[in-house]
Image (tube, helix red, strand yellow):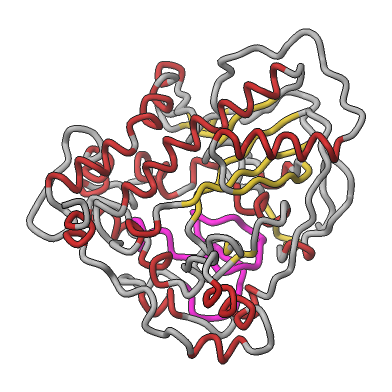
Amino acid sequence: MNAHRNGPKSFSDSDAGIDITDDFERFSQRNDIFSRAFWDERIRSAKTDGFFASYRMEAAPRRGDGFTQRDFALRNASWLSSDILSERGAADGKREGFQAPIAYDTPVAAEQMEIDDPQRMSKEIKRIAEFFGADLCAVTEMDDRWHYETRVDTRDMSAAPNHLPSGITHVFVLGHEMDAELVTTYPSALARAATGRQYSHEAAIVMQVAAYIRNLGYEAIASMNDTALVIPYALKAGLGEYARNQMVITPEFGPRLRFSKIFTSLPLHSDQPKKLGVAEFFNICTKCADACSVKALPFGPPDVSTQTSSIKGVRKWTSNAEKCFGFWAKMASDCAICMRVCLFNRDFSKWRHKLWLKLALSPWRKFALTLDRQRGARIKPSTWWARAK
C-alpha cells in the first residue's frame, strides 16, 4: 500500500519514512485515548473526569511549583479561544477542531478565480498563512488512508460519519511553534499554557486562511485535531521526520510544534517529503524513553502496534497511550517531558545549534549524541514567573 488513493502518485510512503504493512486499517477516532476516556470503562475514572473538568472553573490548584492557582489560571486562559470554538457545535455532537471539522463561517464564492499556475498559488497561500501567523507551511496531496474511518458524536460518544465535500485534492499543513521557555517547565500546569496558546492561535489562523481560499471560490475546510491524522500529512508535506517521541522533528523548531491543516480543492503544487536523517539518529537515541516517568515510550526499533489507541498496520515507534494519559490524569495536566528533553529541542537560529543539527543528521550522529547530554533539564516554573518581575 505505497500509493496514494487520491491525487497524483508523486511520492511514495517510503519517501516520507512511512512503512505500511498488509494489515493496515484506517483509524476510528472513537478509539483515541481522549475519546475512550469518556466511554471506555477501562480508561475512564474519577481522575480522568477531573482532568477534563480542571480546564474549566474546576481547576484544583495545589502545593507544588507549577501547579498553583496562577499556573492553572494561565493554562486555562490560554485555551479560551479554542474552547469557545470547540463548544459552538456541541448541540449537534460536533466538537469543532477536535472531533469535527471547523464549520464554515464564510461561504464559497460563486465566482471562481482562475488558477493557471498551481506552483505560484502554493507560494501565495504560504505567504497568506505566514501573514496570519503560521510558522511553517507546506502542501501535499489528499490521502484518505489517514482520515478517520469515523469521527465521534460527542453527545453520546458514538461513531459518526466523517465526510468531506467532493473535489478536495490537497492538504495545506501548518506548523505553530510552542513557547520554548514554557516547554522547559514540563511537566506542570504552567507548561500546558504553551499548548493551549497555540491551539487558540492555530484555530484563528486556519479559519482565516480557509476563509481566504473560499473567497477565491474553492472549498477549504479548516482542521486541527479532527478529520485526519496530521502527522502523516506533515511527513508527506516535507515538514520533518518522525521520531521515537511520537513527534515530527523539524529542522526549524525540532519537536516544539503543533500542527493544523486545511483540506481544499484549490489547485496547488505539492511539496516533496524530505529524508533528513532523523530516523537514523533516533535508532541510537533513547533519551525521551529514558526520561518518561511512566515508561510509556518504546526503547526498541519501530514496530507494528496492536494497541486500541494506535493505528493498525503501520510500522513505527508507538507510545503506550494508556500509561501516558494515566499520568496526565494523575497530574490534572498534560506532560511533554519527551519534548523537553529531546536533543532536537533547540533554537536553530543560533550557529552552534545549526552545527549540532548537521552533525546529528550525518554519519557523525553518535558524536552529536554525546554532546549536550544534559540538555533538557527542567526549569522551575517559579523561575519563569520570576522573569516577569
Residue range in magenta is: 298-325
Quadrant that contains the N terminus: bottom right
Q: Is residue 357 left or right of residue 386?
A: right
Residue in view at x 66 percent, y 28 percent: 163
Q: Residue 198 or 150: which is nearer the viewer?
A: 198
Residue lying furthest right = 116
Q: Residue furthest top?
A: 110
Magenta segment includes 308: yes
The residue drawn where x is 48% and y is 80% is 286
Left or right relative to 298: residue 215: right
Q: Residue at x 63, y 39 (%)?
A: 149
Residue farthest along the left direction in this orientation: 63
Q: Is residue 43 left or right of residue 223?
A: left
Give coordinates of residue 306: x percent, y percent.
55, 63
* Residue 45 covered by magenta stretch: no
Compared to residue 118, the image places residue 109 above or below, namely above
Q: Please tell me whether residue 274 is drawn above or below residue 263 in the rendered image.
A: below
The picture places residue 258, in percent across and down from the top left corner, at: 50, 49
> Relative to 319, is 125 above or below?
above
Please give the name of the residue rendered at 53% of the width and 29% of the height, measured from the top-left corner. 100
Q: Nearer the viewer, residue 234 or 365?
A: 365
Horizontal and vertical percent position of residue 183: 36, 59
Q: Quadrant of residue 288?
A: bottom left
Q: How many marks?
A: 0
Residue 282 spot, x, y in % from top left: 57, 78
